[in-house]
Image (cartoon, rainbow, N blue to C red):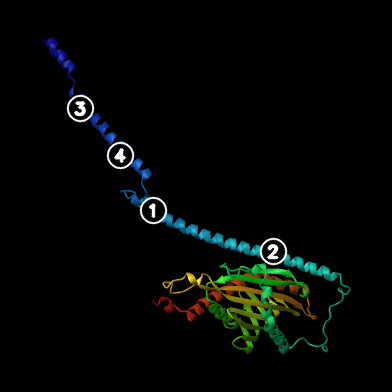
Amino acid sequence: MQQETSTQLAGKPKKKRIRRQKLELEYLRELVVKLENKMTQLKDSHTETPQTKFKPGLEADAKICLVWKDIAQRQQKERERVEDKNKKLRVSLEGQLQLATKLQNLLRKHLRENDMEPLVNAKRFKPQPTTALGPTDDEIFADQLQHVERAHLEVDDLFGGPDFINRGELSSAMHEMHVMSDPNSDTGVAFITTANSTLPFDVKVAEKAFWRAITEEGPLKVGYVHDDKVFTENLVARSFSLRSFGAFQTNVRGKQTHRKFVDGSCIMVMWKSMVEPVEINGTKFRGLRCIQTGWIVLRGVNLADASTFTEADTLGPMMSASLQSYSKMTLELQDDIVDQELQVGALTDFVVNSHCTIKELTGKMIKDLLLEEDWNLNGWIDNLSP
């Protein structure tokens, strides 16, 4: 009897052991639940989008990420802006270098050709008091008027080349300077500037804007004093003096004549000018003149076929204007010129370096005038009316 009781007690587990096993079981169950939850979170994190992550404890991190994202975007935009500016500057400098190199080669060629002339080493003739003076103001204006009255006859030859064949197509503005060999120039070279683009404005708007820029706004905004000899609706002849230009310190004087000629839907602006530099960036000038002739041709362009428009298209076919321009500048060396190489070098350096400044200033002025004249001619009320 006692033996059976001992056997039963030995086979029956102790209460502490049972309790410990239960605790371990509960712990394992809780651990399994935690592990399953973590596994679920890990799976969800791979498929969850940033917009759905709003769990407690992650909102602050999300806000910080958004702040840094905005900062990074601003830095990226600023870097792109600086890189674009540096790229444009690099292209501009490369263009100026190519222009200066070509100019140098042409001038050297011109000097070599002159070395072959018999009297090339003779001393330059200096005018005596009894020597006839240069042309008078009236003679200069008469020569300019004679040129602009016949300049429209040269338009077909000037703009019939390959550089202007795509005049009817929408294109970005092109305003380039080239140095060309010219036997009629005293230095053997000529500065050629061309432009070929399409403006999103009616040809009448473009006509008024460009004529205002030449005869009114331009003289007032670039800071020179002028005296009009002739000022009519289609002809302006004036004397002028320029004291400063952008970052350049200049003192130049000259005379110029502009004429506007209308032939149907084609508007031409032609000019001839004579400029005598007195001082540019500290360099004194004497006996040197710049002669420039130029043309601006505006034509109406219909960007779409009018037959394709319906009554719902209240504005009608979209009209624009093609712009073509050509100018040529040469140098005249007078008999009384001193320090010829210094003057020619300083002037050509100014012409090359100021090209970008001229393009920027005139481009902004023309843009503002185009918008103003478009408002004056078309307004917005007519476009909004039913």
Residue that carries the numbered disc 2 in the rendered image: 98
User: Callout 3 environment at 10 Å: few (<14), some (14 to 19), or many (20+)?
Assistant: few
Nearer the viewer's eye, disc 1 or disc 3?
1
Residue for badge 3: 19
- Looking at the figure, which quarter contains the N terminus? top left
Q: How many marks?
A: 4
Q: Amino acid at mark 4?
A: Asn
Q: CA distance from mark 1 to mark 3?
A: 49 Å
Q: Assess whether mark 2 and mark 1 are in contact (beta carbons under 8 angstroms).
A: no
Q: Residue at x 82, y 68 (%)?
A: 112
Q: Amino acid at mark 2?
A: Gln
The residue type indicated by label 1 comes to Ile
Please determine whether, in this image, residue 229 is positioned above or below residue 57: below
**Image quadrant where residue 344 sits:** bottom right
> Which residue reaches farthest front?
307
Up the image or down, 58 lies above or below 281; here it is above
Q: Earlier in the sequence, mark 4 or mark 2?
A: 4
Q: Amino acid at mark 3?
A: Arg
